[in-house]
Image (spheres, coloured by chain):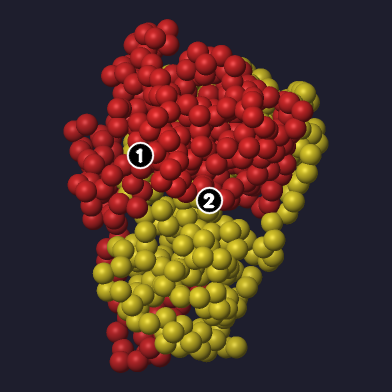
Amino acid sequence: MSHNILVIGELDEGSASATTLELLAGASEIASGGNVSVTLLGVGASQAVGACAGANTAYASDDAQYDDFRGDQWISAIQSAVESETPDVILVAQSIVGRELGPRLSHKLGTAVAMDCVSISDVDGSIKATRPCFGGNAMATYGFSTSPAIATVRAKSFEVTEGGSGPTTSTELPAASQSRTEIIATEAATAEGLQIQDATVVVCGGRGLGDAEAFGEMESIASAIGLDKAAVGASRAAVDLGWYPPSQQVGLTGKVVTPDLYLAVAVSGASQHMAGCSGSKTIVGINRDEEANIWSFSRYGIIGDYKQVVPALIEELKKASGN
Amino acid sequence: MHLVVCAKQIPDPDTPPSAFKIDEASNSVIPAPGISPILSQFDGIAAEAALRIKEAGGDDAKVTVISMGADSARAAIKQVLAMGADEGVLLNDDAFEDGDSYTTAKVLASAIRELGDVDAVFCGRQAADWDMGQVGLLLAEELGWASAIIAKDISYADGNVSVQRVLTDGFETVQMALPAVMTVSNEFGEPRYPKLPQIMAAAKKTVTQYSAAELGLDAADVGASGSRLKIEKLFIPETDSNVEFMGGDTPQEQAAALVQRLQADKLI
């Protein structure tokens, strides 16, 4: 069955974000002939729709007030796109925007949202949303008894298969209305360089490292791979012990990362941790515990003490890269 | 000032994966033997946030803890009472069972309206069982109140709250007028640990119980029958168990074997 799908896009430095393009790729597949539309809000929005491959129609407002997300302002704008499109499915990223927009929009539209989904599919004409729960110990598939079906979707759940261009024009959405919340201060996170959620390789240290100094070795692994693609993360246990900054925490309450390579060093692989990294393409473990949970998720593993394995690994990586 | 904390009792998230079992027929989790359910950790942090506002606000401030759940949820209520909340409310009715986030928010909103004079509601950023993270926002929408989610710090002055929120790449502080709903994240800090005299005192505090009818709710509008999101299948995911361990007599040989695999797979 065909579906009319509205994707609520987000801008990243004036262009449609990577996740927006993923959602559009997924939407065009699920729509099976139905209309796919996209909304973009903020400076550059009306230009950015041009790159929204997969969308047939676009709605945009370049109002700078939309640059800082405020739920009530965004919802008013999106509601006018919803009225024109009457979608039966609405997709939004599981981002700081989607976490708020999903529930609030669902309530405004008299429907429901499934949060943090990793798969959206059509089963005999009905939309089904699948998501991890219980800290990643289980998965749940949901159906909707109201329409539209709204889902917030985890990054990299859909693959962008081809490039291409989007709509050449967009319908203008209204300028921002008055918000009930006023942003009085903003502060950038302390982490410099490549962010873990953008890295193609994440080297993650766990409680088994034993001390904060060992994170220097995790950084050496990242350097040997290349700091343009590798970043260092930490498990919640390591962050709670003060060994590494909270901005680098991987897991359910930290960041969800989906790199091509996830190297887990002295990480046991607790469910809450795996919920933050199990979407990685390849997981590699280094752990001295033969029974560690990390092996259930790993493609490759080295059983051994990281204190011996890591220096050897750094040396081999340097050899391989010719440094 | 009257502050409300929403508290949920959940299966212990630290249950080892080997002890985590589900009943596929009812799409529910089978309680692990010998592992007691706990207060969802984020709700403990929400309680801490409310208590700090109360302590800063003087003698007339009051904190009420509300939990929707079975009779066993009294343990979660007692824990927040031991932390320093003044009164408890248990929302207990068979009709509430197997609801979704929407019906949960609807029941909580009815209870908050019943209390009448509530200024602010504090929820955990998400319950550590289903991890949806939407009851706080839906509750705000039900009540028509302002909301701010994923708080790291909250302060109150002159009818307004300032909420420092955790964003992907930093923090922002928003200000809004009460009444409002806030959800609190682990970055806020650890909840206080009640001592024995406080636990003893908590046993004497009042816990009022409400049914659907007492809140003026129709059983058909709440729980499973009122749900908009229907769970159709709960399952334990298959994990990729084809791990290949690197052979070799020395760490150097193991590391070399791993680097070779990663290069062949074009991962480095």
Decide if residue A259 is in sight here. no
Rendered shade, chain A: yellow
SS for dot 2? loop
User: Which chain does the numbered disc 2 sit on?
Assistant: B
Decide if residue B242 is in sight here. yes
Q: Would you place residue A232 above or below residue A184 in this image?
A: below
Query: How many callouts does the rendering have?
Result: 2
- The residue tagged 2 is B190
Name the side, left or right, on which B79 lies relative to B224.
Answer: right
Name the side, left or right, on which A279 lies relative to A87.
Answer: left
Name the side, left or right, on which A239 lies relative to B157.
Answer: left
Q: Would you place residue A280 above or below residue A34 in this image?
A: below
| Within-10-Å neighbours for mark 1: few <14, some 14–19, many 20+ | many
Tags 2 and 1 on a common chain: yes
Residue at point 34%, 11% (across, down): B219
Q: Quadrant of residue B102?
A: top left
